[in-house]
Amino acid sequence: MGQSTEPEDFGALIRGARCSARLTQAQLGAKCGYSASAISRIEANKLRPEYSAMLRMCEVLAIPPQRMHGFAAPDASAVATVAIRCPSDEEDAVRRRKLLTGALAAGATAIVGGGTASAAAVSGDPTASLEEALFRLPAAEPMALPLLTLQTAAARRAFRAARYRDLGQALPGLLASAEVTREAATGRARQQASGVLARAYVLTAELASKQHSDAAWVAADRALSAARDSGTPVPVGEASRVLAITMRRSGRWSSAVHLLTREAAELDAAEERTAAVRTTLLLTAAYSAATGGDRSMALALLDETEEDVERLPEVPGLFTVEATRAQVDVYRIGALNALGTPDEGVKVVAGLNIDCMPTPERRARAWTDIGRMWHALGDGPQTFAALRRVGLEAPQEVRRPALRALTSDLLYGPARVQGLREFAVRTGALAA
């Protein structure tokens, strides 16, 4: 087993444990004597609760008391204090109105449309309007379920094509429409609307995770809640996957593995569609185990998924990830990188046919993991070649924080790589 990763702060600790326990902010607050908004501020490290309240939260969330070391002293003030300067209610209202204006404009923009510059276009961050939109969705009217399904399918196409700016502009409006459509529906129609809403939140969580945005927590939590309301196993599996990714990114890799393997066990391995979802969950679990240093579990899960894809026919059309042999190979390369044995991935790369992968987003992900492998092996030219392939497959992918960091590492490394500086400027890793 690898060493556990401690959360960087109390807010991250509480947020990760709450999502793992499947509690909303309101539910946790009710158990601890706080409002949902107060829990939100605690998780954002804007409000420091008294020590006794911290202990109560740890009790509710099954966090060992020793994890509290360094967050507060037993003789801390009994009055909750603001950890950083917080604006007044009036300042908050003004700031939110300004941000909401940008969110409304983004939500009103068609997914392939132009129009005025959005917050995402100005900042270069596709998630620029998402956090505020999740706090307060734009106004919307219920729509016919077939139309809502078509809009969600269009958003999915934007994600799979790695058109992240288009997706970021469309999501606030899509989420708002899906929320009000579900609230206006009853019976079977409500369940169907819940499934569509879950997938809209899955896309939101996927995009936020790519940009290292905390909005991923909120979106993944809501995705799973809506998916369970749908009563359909496939959206539940998809939502569990994005929630587990968010857990892993916060250092809770073991919780992520537990969630994924538990959800996978509940899926029917004999039915093609749910079996394919099960395989994607186990792939994500394998990579999560690898990030925690658990080599035996990671490789065992990868071997299991390899057996799955060999015995099952390929099932296209899963929401963001397909269950194919190529996907298994890409996850194996990523897991070997995470385990610190990138040399073992070279043979896997040699047998990988990236061109057969169906979407630019997945092909770009494959080249990203290959680039990380060569970088870990100290091969600058091969790393740069992989980064250029990412840019060819999905130009917006190379502007992600993780890819810019990899480009910067290569740029300031010991070896000079021809064309790298121009690439770094073009992708935002280096100021012009």
Image (cartoon, rainbow, N blue to C red):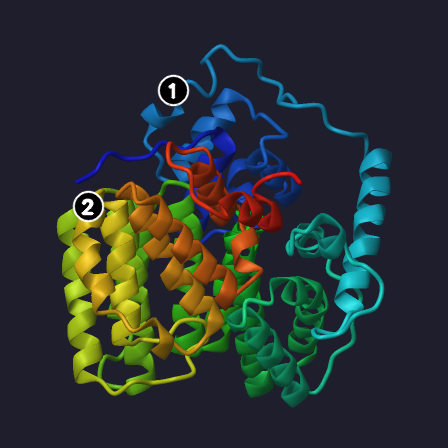
Quarter of the picture containing the C terminus is top right
**How far across and how far down the image is residue 66, in percent?**
32, 24
**Numbered circles on residues, count:** 2
Q: Amino acid at mark 2?
A: Thr
> Which quadrant of the view contains residue 106?
bottom right
In screen coordinates, is 102 left or right of 209?
Answer: right
Give the alpha-carbon distance from disc 2 to disc 1, as whole Å.
Answer: 34 Å
Residue 25 shows up from this direction? no
Q: Which residue extends farthest front?
A: 418
Looking at this view, is 401 or 250 the one in front?
A: 401
Residue at 73%, 60% in the rendered image: 137
Element class at badge 2: loop
Mark in the foreground, 2 or 1: 2
* Residue 245 to residue 366: above or below: above
Which quadrant is the N terminus positioned in? top left
Q: Residue at x 58, y 31 (%)?
A: 45
> Can residue 150 be seen at all in this image of the molecule?
yes
Choose between 174 and 13: the one closer to the eye.
174
Where 78 sits versus 179, above or below?
A: above
Q: Residue at x 64, y 89 (%)?
A: 146
| Residue that mark 2 sits on | 341
Bin the neighbour count of mark 1 within 10 Å (Cα to Cα): few under 14, some 14-19, many 20 and up. few
Q: Which residue is mark 1?
A: 69
Helix, strand or loop at disc 1? loop
